[in-house]
Image (cartoon, helix red, strand yellow):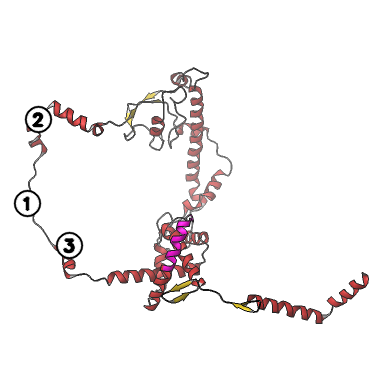
Amino acid sequence: MAMMITRFHKLIQSKVVWYIILGVVIIAFVGFFTPTMRSGGRTQKVTPAGKLNGKKVSREEFSRAYNHVYVWTIISSGRMITMTDELRDLLYKESWKRIAVLRQAQDQNILVTDDEVVQMIQSIPLFKGETGAFDKKMYHAVLSKVDLSISQAEALFREQIVINKLVSGAVQAALISPYELKKMYSLYTDRFVLDYVIIPRSQVEKKITVSKEAAQALFNENPENFRMDAKVRVSFVEFVVSNFLASVELPEGAVQQAYDQNIEQFRVETTNELDAVTYKPFEQVEGEITERLRMDFARKLAAEKATEFVVDVAPKADGAKPDFAGAAASAKLKVKTMAAFSMDDTLKGIDPTAPFRQAAFGLEDDAFTSFSDAVVGKDSV
């Protein structure tokens, strides 16, 4: 065994042996990676994806078209799409259409300028920020999401512009008869002079009489036309958020953390899309953030107090009833009662940001559902 190891050790130190091994490896790799793979002495040719008007469509060309159709569907719709068998079939058909249109455009030598590509990119809603202007960060984020490089994206948009030009050119070249053209032109140029009189309702309604029987018959035939909206009448107590501001204590570093986490809210807007993105300094917005956080914490305290009140209202034993008035008296809160209102009525004195109507119409005549949980709004709970 030792002799075999020694002889093997001498072999692996021989340069001639390593050259032979290296040559075999290179030959193997060359044979594996050449486009026409040899197996058993036979050459396997790469089959095309299909034919279009008698011309072959390579798998690479079809794959590119398929990917562009898929990505353009996401970008133009503004949302990610869930792949299904039905959608996969649709993308397959649209890919062949895209290849046919692009080949037709190539025959017509349709050109696209760089300015047109930039204009298309800046006009796509998915690439715009909160202000409605083109946002570079949003643009790069979307491309990253769909796994597209900048050069690949620009190639996609260039193709899309070519398709748009070809389609619009076909529409503009459509024949219109002289009669249709004259009729369309007349819609914009013809003028009419009309004489009319106005008969006020007040001049005729006094002369019209309706019998009770006729009115009853109309009601019986169309009862749904006279149905009133459902209404509810509720009592409530209110916890004003601002009353809890004095009890608020912000944690150390909370303001700085809120600034960092919501930095986009403090972006300095500019009309020049080429300007670098800048943000308002922390010192400039510290007071604004502090007040906002204080209100958020105060709202949380108000909601906690309202939840404690709900617990006091709830029945304390089986068969017991909720004691809304008693809980309000114990908490020294004023009970307010609303006039009956419908889902569409305007509620005066109610925080419009609170889901008050939904909570009111969700109540039932039951010991545990005749009162709601805390209904949180911006300024009151």
Q: Position of residue 346 (x, y in %)?
A: 32, 34
> Dot 3 surroundings within 10 Å: few (below 14), some, or many (20 or more)?
few
Front label number (2 vs 3): 2
- Which range of residues does the magenta coloring cover? 82-96
Q: Nearer the viewer, residue 166 or 264?
A: 166
> Dot 2 surroundings within 10 Å: few (below 14), some, or many (20 or more)?
few
Q: Which residue is mark 2?
A: 209
Please report the residue visible at 55 percent of the width from the left and 39 percent of the height from the top: 250
Q: Nearer the viewer, residue 142 or 80?
A: 80
Mark 2 vs 1, N-terminal side: 1
Mark 1 vs 3, N-terminal side: 3
Mark 1 belongs to which amino acid? Answer: Asp
Look at the numbered discs 1 and 3 and tell me whether their residues touch, using CB distance below 8 Å: no
Look at the numbered discs 2 and 3 and tell me whether their residues touch, using CB distance below 8 Å: no
Please report the residue visible at 8 percent of the width from the left and 32 percent of the height from the top: 206
Estimate the spatial distance between the alpha carbons at disc 2 and disc 3, rounded to whole Å.
46 Å
Q: Secondary structure at mark 1?
A: loop
Mark 2 belongs to which amino acid? Answer: Thr
Q: Main secondary structure of the magenta part?
A: helix
Q: Position of residue 103 (x, y in %)?
A: 41, 75
Q: Nearer the viewer, residue 324 or 292?
A: 324
Q: Give residue 164's quadrant in the image.
A: bottom left
Mark sitting on residue 188: 3
> Dot 1 surroundings within 10 Å: few (below 14), some, or many (20 or more)?
few
Q: Which residue is mark 1?
A: 195
Estimate the spatial distance between the alpha carbons at disc 2 and disc 1, rounded to whole Å.
31 Å
Q: Secondary structure at mark 3?
A: helix
Mark 2 vs 3, N-terminal side: 3
Q: Secondary structure at mark 2?
A: loop
Q: Position of residue 343 (x, y in %)?
A: 34, 34
